[in-house]
Image (cartoon, rainbow, N blue to C red):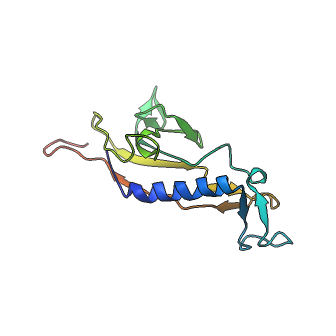
């Protein structure tokens, strides 16, 4: 598995960490319909959805596998964190890790595999408007699952 443009993810994670360090985040008013338009709120008032800091992860999951006769999502890694019940591995996408952006070699059996990404802590719940989430930063990373030449993939 190879990752591309990991530097974009790193810069957006730094942006969120800078906002947290500043201690204040302002709504741009685009999602507000009341007196909170354009207001600033302490970071503690925003719902960071359980993430103390921005985190990104990946996993390789089978699209069509069955486990014990039941259609289920089968992923290669157990994961360091979960989003919507799916596991994600963070090591290669953690800017503080020495493995950041490094490719990862794994052995897969023939199947219908896809590379999945999960991001947490980049989108926060508004402190005054229930059900409204605000993007603090826009993480991005690309990657691919590479097969050796001559290997049958399905």
13 or 147: nearer the viewer: 13
Please state the horizontal and vertical placement of residue 113, each as a whole percent of the image: 35, 43
47 or 146: nearer the viewer: 47
Please state the horizontal and vertical placement of residue 107, each as a whole percent of the image: 28, 33
Left or right relative to 52: residue 111: left
Name the residue located 39 percent from the left edge and 40 percent from the top edge.
98
The reply to whether residue 124 is visible in this rendering is yes
Residue occupying the far left of the picture: 150
66 or 145: nearer the viewer: 145
2 or 13: nearer the viewer: 13
The quarter of the picture where residue 15 lies is bottom right
Name the residue located 53 percent from the left edge and 55 percent from the top edge.
14
Residue occupying the far right of the picture: 35
The quarter of the picture where residue 110 lies is top left
Please state the horizontal and vertical placement of residue 29, each as a whole percent of the image: 74, 73
Name the residue located 39 percent from the left edge and 45 percent from the top edge.
100
């Amino acid at each position: 598995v190879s990752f591309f443009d990991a530097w974009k993810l790193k810069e957006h994670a730094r942006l969120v960490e800078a906002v947290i360090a500043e201690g204040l985040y302002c709504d741009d008013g685009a999602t507000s319909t009341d007196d909170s338009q354009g207001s600033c709120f302490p970071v503690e008032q925003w719902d960071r959805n359980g993430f103390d800091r921005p985190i990104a992860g990946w996993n390789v999951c089978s699209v069509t596998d069955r486990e014990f006769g039941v259609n289920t999502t089968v992923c290669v890694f157990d994961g360091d964190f979960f989003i919507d019940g799916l596991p994600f591995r963070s090591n290669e996408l953690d800017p503080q890790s020495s493995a950041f952006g490094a490719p990862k070699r794994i052995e897969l059996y023939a199947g219908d595999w896809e590379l999945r990404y999960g991001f947490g802590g980049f989108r926060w719940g508004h402190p005054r408007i229930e059900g409204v989430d605000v993007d603090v930063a826009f993480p991005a990373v690309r990657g691919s699952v590479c097969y050796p030449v001559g290997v049958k993939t399905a």
